[in-house]
C-alpha cells in the first residue's frame, strides 16, 4: 500500500508515533489509510449538513476495514458571492481546491480517498485533484435542498424565490412584505440549490462518469438515502483500494463524452464546458469544444429541469434520476466501468424510470440539445448558450448593442431602466483574465427576467453564467476582451445577430471598421494587481481551454 511509506519499518517509528497521536491504534496500522476530503462549511447552504455525512463515510470505511482521516478543503457559495467582487474568487477556487486535495493526500501518502463535495467549483476541483493523485477515489455529492413553498407558490427555488423576485418587486408585481416572505422560504433546508444549476449538473455528470454511486447526485441532502449512500461510498472506496481501481481507469475520453451527452440531454449548466475541459486536461485526455459541438449535433434534450421548467431536482430524483437518464440514452453511451462496481449498461438495466418525466430518447418531444457552442466574428474561438433556457421563438435574435465594461455598470443600467426591448447587453472585461476570475452574471440575467425582458433582450459576455440563468444569454465569448477579442471592439448601437439554429453569433460591422477600432483600442489594464487573483489572471488560459491554470 502507498501508506506503507509512512508506517512500515523501523525508520518509520517517528511517523507511527505521530499517527498514534491522532488516535490510530497499532492494530489499524495495517489497514488502508483512507482520506475523507470534506468541504464542510458553515458559510455554504449546500455544505452545512456534511458533518453527519462525514460520520457516515467514516463508518463505512471502518466497517470495510479501513482507517479514515478527515481533512478540510475550501468551499464558496456562488449565490452568496454573486453580484459583487467576491465572485472573482469562485472559478479560481476550483484550482485551489484541486491543489488542497492533491497536497494533503500526497503529503500523507493516502491509499484512497472519499471526496465529499456539493457546490459549483468544489466537485470539479475535487475531480481534478483525484486525477492528479490517481489513487482509488469516490465522490459523495451532498445533494440538493428541498423545494421552497410560500403563499401558495410551490416548487420555489433560489432563483424564482429570490433572484428573480427582486425584479418582480422592482416592477411592482409583489410587495416588500411578500419579497421578505419569499426570502425566508425559498431555500428551506441544507443542500445545493434546487434546479439543474452548476452544482447539481456537476453532481449528475460525476455520476454519469462513474465517480459516484447511483442516485448520489439527486438524493436529497436531508434524506436517509443520502446518509446510506455516504456509508456505502465509505465501504466501496476500500474495495476500490483492494482492486487498485484508480480515477484514470474510470475518467476516460469515453466516460467524459458520456457525461457531455448526458449534459446536452439534461440542458445543464454552461459552466460544465469549463469543468469538463479542465478535468480532461488533468487526466491528459483529448477533449475539446469540438466534442461538445459534435455531440450537440446528434443529441437532443430529453427532460427540462428548473430553470428551464418548473420541475426541480426532487422531481428528477423521484422520476429515476441519473440511472433513468442513462437508460434513456443507453444507445448513445459507451459501456464504461464505474466506481460502484457496475458498468454503465448494468446501471441502465437496473434503473426505474417515470417515463412521463424522463421519456425514452425516441419519445422525447424536444428537437434541440440543451446546450450549444456558437461561432462567428464575435467569438472566433467559440461561446456557449444554454438552449434549454431559451424559448424556441427566440432562437434567432437580432438587436442593438449596449456595452458595459463591468457587471456593475450593466446592473446600474438595468436598475435605472436604461435597458429596452431589442437591446443586446454586452458585458466585457469579465473573462478569466479580465475579471479576473470570470464572474457569473446571474444578478443581471435574473433582473432581466424579473422585469419581463427575458424574451425581449439578449445578454452576451466574456464572463460566464450560473446554471440558474435562463433567457438569450451567451457566455464564454473567446477571445475575451482582455486578450483583444472582438467583443472589446463593440460600440453602442452595433447590430448583433444570435442564431441558435445555425450555431452562429455575428457582429454586423465590416472587417475594415473593426481594424480601425482595434488601432484605437487602449491596452488592457489589470483590475487586480496583487494577491491570489493577480497570480491567477497572469497564468489562466481562456475559456475555450477550460480556464485552466
Image (tube, rainbow, N blue to C red):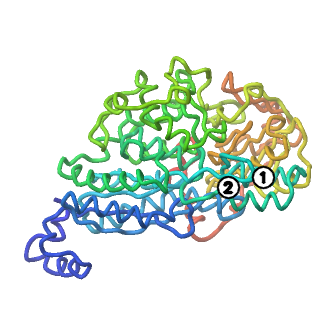
Q: Residue at x 41, y 58 (%)?
A: 116
* 31 relative to 377, above or below: below
Tags 2 and 1 in contact by the CB under 8 Å rule? yes
Asked where in the image residue 56 lies, by quadrant, the reply is bottom left
Q: Residue at x 30, y 43 (%)?
A: 340
Q: Where does the image place residue 234, in percent across and percent down from the top left? A: 30, 56
Instruction: Identify the secondary structure beneath mark 2.
Output: loop
Residue with the mark numbered 2: 186
Q: Residue at x 68, y 44 (%)?
A: 469
Residue 127 can be seen in this image? no
Q: Where does the image place residue 311, in percent across and percent down from the top left? A: 62, 38
Q: Residue furthest top?
A: 362
* 38 relative to 460, above or below: below
Q: Earlier in the sequence, mark 2 or mark 1?
A: 1
Residue 183 left/right relative to 125: right
Number of numbered discs present? Answer: 2
Q: Where does the image place residue 190, in percent across and percent down from the top left? A: 54, 60
Spatial CA span between label 2 and label 1: 10 Å
* 151 relative to 177, above or below: above
Residue with the mark numbered 1: 165
**Where the N terminus falls, by quadrant?**
bottom left
Amino acid at each position: 500500500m502507498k501508506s506503507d511509506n509512512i508506517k512500515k519499518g523501523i525508520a518509520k517509528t517517528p511517523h507511527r508515533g505521530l499517527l498514534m497521536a491522532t488516535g490510530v491504534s497499532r492494530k489499524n496500522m495495517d489497514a488502508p489509510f483512507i482520506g475523507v476530503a470534506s468541504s464542510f462549511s458553515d458559510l455554504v447552504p449546500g455544505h452545512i449538513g456534511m458533518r453527519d455525512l462525514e460520520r457516515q463515510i467514516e463508518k463505512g470505511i471502518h466497517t470495510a476495514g479501513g482507517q479514515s482521516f478527515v481533512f478540510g478543503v475550501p468551499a464558496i457559495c456562488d449565490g452568496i458571492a454573486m453580484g459583487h467582487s467576491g465572485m472573482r474568487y469562485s472559478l479560481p477556487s476550483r484550482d485551489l481546491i484541486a491543489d488542497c486535495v492533491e497536497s494533503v493526500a500526497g503529503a500523507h501518502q493516502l491509499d484512497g480517498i472519499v471526496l465529499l463535495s456539493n457546490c459549483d467549483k468544489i466537485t470539479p476541483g475535487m475531480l481534478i485533484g483525484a486525477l492528479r493523485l490517481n489513487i482509488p477515489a469516490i465522490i459523495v455529492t451532498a445533494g440538493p435542498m428541498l423545494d421552497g413553498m410560500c403563499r401558495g407558490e410551490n416548487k420555489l427555488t433560489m432563483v424564482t424565490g429570490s433572484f428573480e423576485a427582486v425584479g418582480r418587486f422592482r416592477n411592482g408585481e409583489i410587495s416588500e412584505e411578500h419579497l421578505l416572505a419569499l426570502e425566508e422560504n425559498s431555500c428551506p433546508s441544507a443542500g445545493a440549490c434546487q434546479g439543474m444549476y452548476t452544482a447539481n449538473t456537476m453532481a449528475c455528470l460525476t455520476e454519469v462518469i462513474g465517480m459516484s454511486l447511483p442516485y448520489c447526485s439527486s438524493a436529497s441532502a436531508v434524506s436517509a438515502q443520502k446518509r446510506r449512500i455516504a456509508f456505502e461510498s465509505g465501504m466501496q472506496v476500500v474495495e476500490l483500494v483492494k482492486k487498485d481501481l484508480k480515477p484514470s481507469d474510470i475518467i476516460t475520453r469515453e466516460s467524459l463524452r458520456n457525461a457531455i451527452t448526458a449534459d446536452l440531454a439534461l440542458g445543464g449548466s454552461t459552466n460544465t464546458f469549463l469543468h469538463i475541459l479542465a478535468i480532461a486536461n488533468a487526466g491528459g485526455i483529448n477533449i475539446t469544444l469540438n466534442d461538445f459541438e459534435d455531440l450537440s449535433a446528434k443529441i437532443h434534450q430529453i427532460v427540462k429541469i428548473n430553470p428551464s421548467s418548473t420541475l426541480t431536482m426532487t422531481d428528477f430524483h423521484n422520476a429515476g434520476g441519473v440511472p433513468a437518464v442513462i437508460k434513456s440514452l443507453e444507445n448513445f453511451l459507451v459501456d464504461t466501468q464505474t466506481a460502484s462496481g457496475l458498468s454503465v449498461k448494468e446501471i441502465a438495466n437496473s434503473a426505474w424510470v417515470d417515463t412521463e418525466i424522463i421519456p425514452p430518447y425516441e419519445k422525447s418531444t424536444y428537437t434541440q440539445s440543451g446546450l450549444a457552442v456558437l461561432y462567428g466574428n464575435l467569438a472566433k474561438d467559440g461561446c456557449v448558450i444554454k438552449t434549454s433556457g431559451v424559448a424556441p421563438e427566440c432562437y434567432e435574435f437580432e438587436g442593438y448593442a449596449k456595452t458595459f465594461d463591468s457587471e456593475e455598470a450593466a446592473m446600474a443600467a438595468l436598475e435605472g431602466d436604461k435597458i429596452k426591448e431589442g437591446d443586446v447587453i454586452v458585458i466585457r472585461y469579465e473573462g478569466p483574465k479580465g475579471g479576473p476570475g470570470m464572474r457569473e452574471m446571474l444578478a443581471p440575467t435574473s433582473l432581466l427576467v424579473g422585469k419581463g425582458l427575458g424574451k425581449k433582450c439578449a445578454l452576451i459576455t466574456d464572463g460566464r453564467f450560473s446554471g440558474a440563468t435562463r433567457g438569450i444569454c451567451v457566455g464564454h465569448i473567446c477571445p475575451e476582451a482582455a486578450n483583444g477579442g472582438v467583443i472589446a471592439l463593440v460600440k453602442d448601437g452595433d447590430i448583433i445577430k444570435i442564431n441558435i439554429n445555425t450555431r452562429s453569433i455575428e457582429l454586423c460591422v465590416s472587417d475594415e471598421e473593426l481594424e480601425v477600432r482595434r488601432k484605437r483600442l487602449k491596452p488592457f489594464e489589470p483590475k487586480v494587481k496583487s494577491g491570489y487573483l493577480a497570480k491567477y489572471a497572469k497564468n489562466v488560459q481562456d475559456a475555450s481551454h477550460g480556464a485552466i491554470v
